[in-house]
Image (spheres, helix red, strand yellow):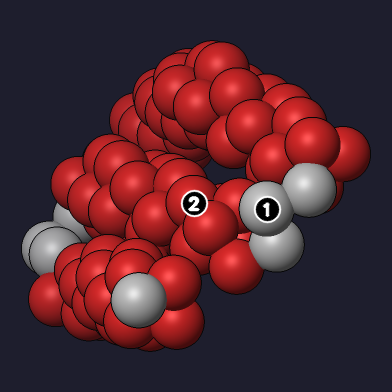
């Protein structure tokens, strides 16, 4: 039963990772690409870490999987936001330089 649950969680995680990759290719602009990939890959990673915790029912492994999941959930949105602000800044600078010419 443990192997079946682990396999299902890995498949769901891989599906979300695949959706993140497809979203990277299909979304029209940078900001939608960043949003799509951040959300889908974070969920995919969460499911993969749950699969690790189910497969290895050791307290150390479960604690590490939870710590990795928590770290990624807390930092992925702030990283996306920072990258988005930097992209907007460079876009505005490029537009201002083109306007000067």
Q: What residue is pinned by disc 1?
A: 57
Q: Nearer the viewer, residue 91 or 41?
A: 41
Image quarter of residue 27: bottom left
Q: Nearer the viewer, mark 1 or mark 2?
A: 1
Q: Is residue 58 left or right of residue 13?
A: right
Q: Nearer the viewer, residue 99 or 60?
A: 60
Q: Residues within 10 Å of mark 1 (few under 14, many from 20)?
A: few
| Image label count | 2
Residue 72 image offset from top left, x and y in percent: 61, 33
Indicate the secondary structure of the residue bearing disc 2. helix
Residue 87 image offset from top left, x and y in percent: 48, 34
Residue beneath the point at 60% across and 68% down: 55
Q: What residue is pinned by disc 2?
A: 50
| Mark number, residue 26 | none
Relative height, residue 42 to residue 33 (above, below): above
Q: Is residue 52 left or right of residue 24?
A: right
Residue beneath the point at 53% across and 58% down: 54
Relative height, residue 59 to residue 1 (above, below): above
Indicate the secondary structure of the residue bearing disc 1. loop
Q: Is residue 23 left or right of residue 1?
A: left
In the picture, the quarter occupied by the C terminus is top left
Image quarter of residue 16: bottom left
Relative height, residue 60 to residue 99 (above, below): below
Q: Is residue 5 left or right of residue 85?
A: left
Q: Nearer the viewer, residue 47 or 19?
A: 47
In the picture, the quarter occupied by the N terminus is bottom left
């Amino acid at each position: 039963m443990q192997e079946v649950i682990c396999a299902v969680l890995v498949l769901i995680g891989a599906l979300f990772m695949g959706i993140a990759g497809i979203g990277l290719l299909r979304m029209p602009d940078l900001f939608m690409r960043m949003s799509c990939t951040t959300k889908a890959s974070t969920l995919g990673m969460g499911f993969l870490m749950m699969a690790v915790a189910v497969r290895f029912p050791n307290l150390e492994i479960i604690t590490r999987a939870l710590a990795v999941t928590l770290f990624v959930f807390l930092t992925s949105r702030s990283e996306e936001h920072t990258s988005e602000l930097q992209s907007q800044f460079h876009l505005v600078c490029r537009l201002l330089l083109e306007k000067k010419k």
